[in-house]
Image: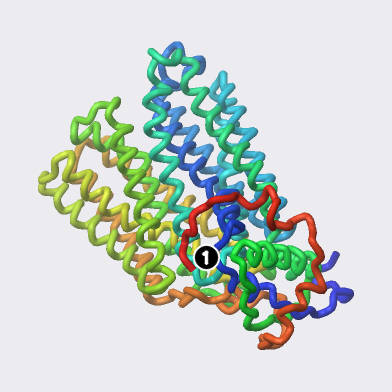
Amino acid sequence: MSDSDPKMETIETRVPSRLDRLPWSNFHWMIVIGLGTVWILDGLEVTIVGSIGQRLTEKGSGIVLDASQIGTAAAFYVAGACLGALFFGQLTDRFGRKKLFLLTLGVYVLATIATAFSFSAWYFFAARFFTGAGIGGEYAAINSAIDELIPARLRGRVDLMINGSFWIGAAGGAVASIALLDTALFAADVGWRLAFGIGALLGVGILLVRRNVPESPRWLFIHGRDDEAEEIVGDIEEAIEEEKGEELPQPDDSIRVKPRERISFREIAQTAISKYPRRTALGLALFVGQAFMYNAVTFDLGTLLGEFFNVSSGSVPFYLALFGVSNFLGPFTLGRLFDTVGRKPMVTATYLGSSALTVVLAVLLLGNSLTTWTFMALVLAIFFIASAGASSAYLTVSEIFPMETRALSIAFFYAAGTAAGGIAGPLLFGHFIASGSQDQVATGFFIGAAVMAIGGIAELLFGVKAERRQLEDIAEPLTAEGVRQDGKDQHDRRREHHPAGRYRLGRGSHSSPPGLPNWPPR
């Protein structure tokens, strides 16, 4: 079908307003559990591989790799994540959020199971590549779906908390690896395989919950499937009214769109470059900054501790667990401020604040003034702040581009940031650490501070006031026609268009998890 289908008529919909005025409910908890918890798997994956790397170089492990091949495997994982994000990102915008977030999780589960049965270097590299591809696709499909289903007033804190949950997995992976690598408990060729098996098992559990998550109604009406969108939103509303015991307020306004089956990649690219060049520059600055800092320190923290602070390899997982906890607490505690204080001041503050603390750390390294715990205290403080900033990068690019380009925008900036900062960071830090000079390591932290500062300055100059605003107000859909219509008189129209359907989430439905806490508050 052509990009513009003359058979599709202009439609007027209140779906965005109806979704954004919903109170927090069991439906939203299902979104968090079914979609957001996948970042825990990503954190688990990255940390476990870092922890078991040494075991894979030992005889008796069932697969003998050398140190350089461990690094090569990490490169395959990162390359797979970048390419997977781009490949699955454009499919997500074309075929829908649900089809792709089921597919990408399936790819992750199968590739992780395959990794557990690795027997040679080439097989391990291939399995890591496809595991990364599944995770990269998840970044695009999941972030776009979450932001389109979570009410506008809560979108910032929920998005940051979900992206920050990566570090729950990272902390859990660090602790779990201690037991899994204990040869008194598991044979040398078994423990590391179980680590991957656990990740796959968790993925299957998430997949079962995810089946009940509906397609994004915003994506549906953009693609001419407005009846399905109305039905899904109507069922959500009915379930929430039954759960809360009160009628929902009327939606504020409507939007007119001219649906299209497909939107060309060329038009999407022109939108980013021609219509939103400042936003494009902002996205690149935020992603390159956080990717440089995070990949450099996450991959090299254990080596830094061992080389310069005489921390034994057996103790490194405990420090990595502390690092993970600090990184989760940042977005969890600061996330609310991104909705109240605002996106622009908070993104700027987190990037510039973490940059300033990184400068302090670098100066103290130059003076050889740090002990193990003062070094860790500064690292934990830096990444407590930086983690909220890094999570906000995903939130930012998800919000500031039109809905038709949302998944591909996330994929592009993730891939570009990871390819630039994510590769350069570990390479530079690895070289500086190998020199044995704290002064050179300090230079690495100065560079990290600079790229984070560039992200903060870009937000200060180009940041968008997106807090508590509908996504369609932040970036008008490419298919939008005319102006928004204020229409509170047709609130009950939804009852006419969506009889109870397969996405009903009311009483008796297996899709509404009972007894969940009321977080976040209304």
Q: Position of residue 501 (x, y in %)?
A: 79, 59
Coloration of the structure image: rainbow
For the question of whether residue 270 can be seen, the reply is no
Q: Position of residue 421 (x, y in %)?
A: 42, 52
Tell me the residue that label 1 is attached to: 397
For the question of whether residue 410 can be seen, the reply is yes
Along the line of sight, the residue nearer the viewer: 93 or 287: 93
Q: Position of residue 425 (x, y in %)?
A: 37, 48
Q: Give the farthest residue toward the right.
A: 7
Question: Quick one: quadrant of the N terminus?
Answer: bottom right
Quarter occupied by residue 7: bottom right
Q: What kind of element bears circle 1?
A: helix
Along the line of sight, the residue nearer the viewer: 87 or 388: 388
Q: Say above or below: 305 vs 281.
A: above
Q: Hey, what amino acid is under mark 1?
A: Val
Q: Position of residue 206 (x, y in %)?
A: 60, 42
| Residue at figure coordinates x 60%, y 60% from the top left | 144
Quarter occupied by residue 264: bottom right
Along the line of sight, the residue nearer the viewer: 97 or 37: 37
Left of 452 or right of it: where is 138? right
Along the line of sight, the residue nearer the viewer: 423 or 224: 224
| Residue at figure coordinates x 43%, y 74% from the top left | 463
- Mark 1 crowd level (few <14, some 14–19, many ≥20, 10 Å Cα): many
Left of 57 or right of it: where is 239? right
* Count of numbered circles in the view: 1
Left of 16 or right of it: where is 169? left
| Residue at figure coordinates x 64%, y 69% from the top left | 403
| Residue at figure coordinates x 56%, y 59% from the top left | 410
